[in-house]
């Protein structure tokens, strides 16, 4: 299973390298591109996995707003692993199918985590966009 998830990750990273899907970064943040791409993949997988019919029952609730709010709430946690735990819990998920190497890499860069906390709306929007691409291009190995 791990090899399948790694190949899924590679395919998604290739999508994120396309100009139309690339994350817009300042020159100062360019060294963090890999971190942004990994976080986008991770959040896209959570977004895909969430049961939106159950979560957003009201006609007046937009899943984008709910997802953004849940991500913001989970970012109060000190580590990426804890952020993942809380976000999965908030969305009623037991887990998310992402290679552990994603968390290991994200965990090593505190500057990126601070950027993620400041730029949460952009990253969640990008994750939702990439979730659609993953789904439409049939890159999903395991939901």
Image (cartoon, helix red, strand yellow):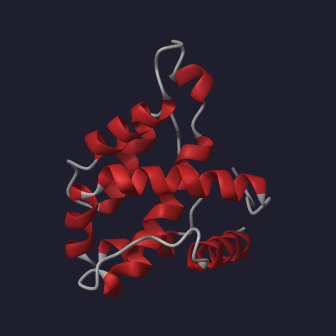
User: In the rendered image, which quarter is residue 54 located in?
Assistant: top right
Q: Position of residue 43 (x, y in %)?
A: 48, 54
Q: Position of residue 23 (x, y in %)?
A: 45, 70
In the rendered image, the residue lying farthest to the right is 138
User: In the rendered image, which quarter is residue 141 located in?
Assistant: bottom right
The N terminus: image quadrant:
bottom right
Q: Is residue 72 in view?
A: yes
Q: Residue at x 61, y 45 (%)?
A: 48
Judge left or right: residue 54 versus residue 110. Answer: right
Judge left or right: residue 73 versus residue 51. Answer: left
Q: Position of residue 18 (x, y in %)?
A: 61, 77
Depicted 9 relative to depicted 127: above or below = below
Q: Residue at x 69, y 75 (%)?
A: 11
Q: Nearer the viewer, residue 135 or 74?
A: 135
Q: Residue at x 37, y 55 (%)?
A: 122
Q: Position of residue 99 (x, y in %)?
A: 56, 69
Q: Nearer the viewer, residue 79 or 60?
A: 60
């Amino acid at each position: 299973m791990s090899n399948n998830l790694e190949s899924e990750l590679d395919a998604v990273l290739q999508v994120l390298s396309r100009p139309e899907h690339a994350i817009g970064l300042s020159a100062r943040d360019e060294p963090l591109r890999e971190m942004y791409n990994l976080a986008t993949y991770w959040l896209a997988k959570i977004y895909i996995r969430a049961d939106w019919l159950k979560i957003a029952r009201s006609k007046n609730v937009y899943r984008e707003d709910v997802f953004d709010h849940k991500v913001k709430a989970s970012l109060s946690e000190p580590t990426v692993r804890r952020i993942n735990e809380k976000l999965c819990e908030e969305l009623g998920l037991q887990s998310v199918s992402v290679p552990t190497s994603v968390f290991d890499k994200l965990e090593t860069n505190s500057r990126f985590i601070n950027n993620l906390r400041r730029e949460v709306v952009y990253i969640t929007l990008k994750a939702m966009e990439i979730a659609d691409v993953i789904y439409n291009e049939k890159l999903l190995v395991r939901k």
